[in-house]
Amino acid sequence: MRLHAKIISGISNIKMKKLTETKQRFFSLFIVTRLPILVVSGVVVAGVLSPVVIVSADSFQDQINQLNDQNAQTQNSLNSLVGQAQSYQDAISQLQQQINAVQASIYANEAKQADLQSQIQAAQTQLDQQKAGLAQDLKAMYVSGTMSTVEMLATSKSLSDYIDAQTYSSAVQNKIQTTLAQITQLQVELEQQKTEVGQLLAEQQQQQTQLAGAQAQQQQLLAMNQSQQDTFNQQIKNNNTKIADLRAQQLAANRSLGGQVVAGDPGHGGYPSNLANAAQDTLTDPWGMYNRECVSYAAWKVYQNYGYMPYWGGSGNAIQWPANARAAGIPTGSTPRVGSVAIWPVGYYGHAMWVEAVNGNMIYVSQYNYDLAGHYSEMWVNGSNFTYLYFH
């Protein structure tokens, strides 16, 4: 904002130029009521606005991003485990269905085996009865067989009676032989069926044992899976707790920087709307930096004002910018200038701000993510301990 430079220049020459309506009221408030206190009283400036050695916004945000990335990776692993758990549960259910089917078949074959045993016993009873009848018949036949042919003819009333007796004797013998053969064959068949059913039962019981073992393995895998899910859920919970702690620390750190924070330019310093309107850290700018971060905004301001901005390693850390600038032949120094990038070299990551106006050691800056919510803001701060990058 060139207008800020003109205002400060007017202050230095003790000539107040006429400003635009909104800016005039805003800066008059700071110049008339704020600056005398800050500039005249060196003690107040040192006591209120001197930078404190604390971790910067980007330091916390980078840690938060890392934790969020960990949570995202953990959640992906968790989702995979949930899918595996479902497959384990499906396998357990299928195995249980097979076990149930085998068990039903076992019950049916056991019933068949019991029925065959009943039939075998009934056949044995019938065989015993037939044998008893056979004994009576054999006895009768023996008595009849002791007679000679002449005696049988003599005792018969007629030739017809003789023939009937002979026929009866032959029929009895044939019936006995046929019945004994049938019963014996039935016993053999029943015993064979009983043996086959017994073998089938043994195979089914072995199959049931194998299915139960497979089901136990699936249940063990499912238990391990659920244990891993619990571990991942706990990791996510712990990371969320760390994120909450980091946000609380960041808010405290930002307040320690001092200065009166205002919403400032409703156009957010010209920051591209696609980056400004997207959720924080969901997009990357043309220099590979996360959107709505201080470095992304500072990079945009350099490009907006000078038409170029070096690509400094993806998401970038503000504290690395001075070395990157020197390596690229871009001057750096400790004197604040309008249109320079102010780097707060505190912590591992640092913090980047765009210098809008200068009044001695006091600088008016625009920035992103001062509030740790990815918002644009402006404020006056003491820039004595900053490093400045001069892109022009």
Image (spheres, rainbow, N blue to C red):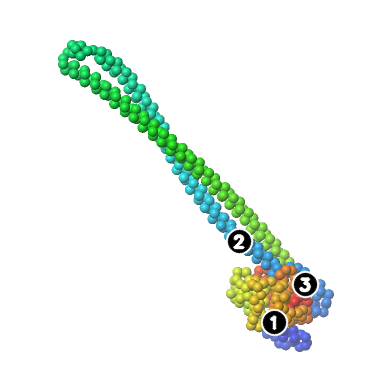
Secondary structure of the residue carrying numbered label 2? helix
Mark 2 to mark 1 CA distance (whole Å): 39 Å
Q: Nearer the viewer, mark 1 or mark 3?
A: 1
Q: Are marks 2 and 1 in contact (CB under 8 Å)?
A: no
From where the camera sits, is residue 107 visible?
no
Kind of residue indicated by mark 2? Gln
| Mark 3 surroundings: few (<14), some (14-19) or many (≥20) residues within 10 A | some
Q: Earlier in the sequence, mark 3 or mark 2?
A: 3
Secondary structure of the residue carrying numbered label 3? loop
Q: Which mark is residue 158?
A: none
Q: Nearer the viewer, residue 219 or 279?
A: 219
From where the camera sits, is residue 148 visible?
yes
Q: Which mark is residue 73?
A: 2
Q: Earlier in the sequence, mark 1 or mark 3?
A: 3
| Mark 2 surroundings: few (<14), some (14-19) or many (≥20) residues within 10 A | some
Rendered location of residue 67, percent (x, y): 65, 63
Q: Nearer the viewer, residue 131 or 109?
A: 131
In the rendered view, tell whether residue 295 sits above or below residue 116: below
Q: Residue at x 29, y 18 (%)?
A: 137
Q: Earlier in the sequence, mark 2 or mark 1?
A: 2
| Mark 1 surroundings: few (<14), some (14-19) or many (≥20) residues within 10 A | some
Mark 1 to mark 3 CA distance (whole Å): 24 Å
Q: Nearer the viewer, mark 3 or mark 2?
A: 2
Q: Residue at x 61, y 76 (%)?
A: 286
Q: Quadrant of residue 60?
A: bottom right
Which residue position holds label 1?
Answer: 391
Which residue position holds label 3?
Answer: 51
Kind of residue indicated by mark 1? Phe
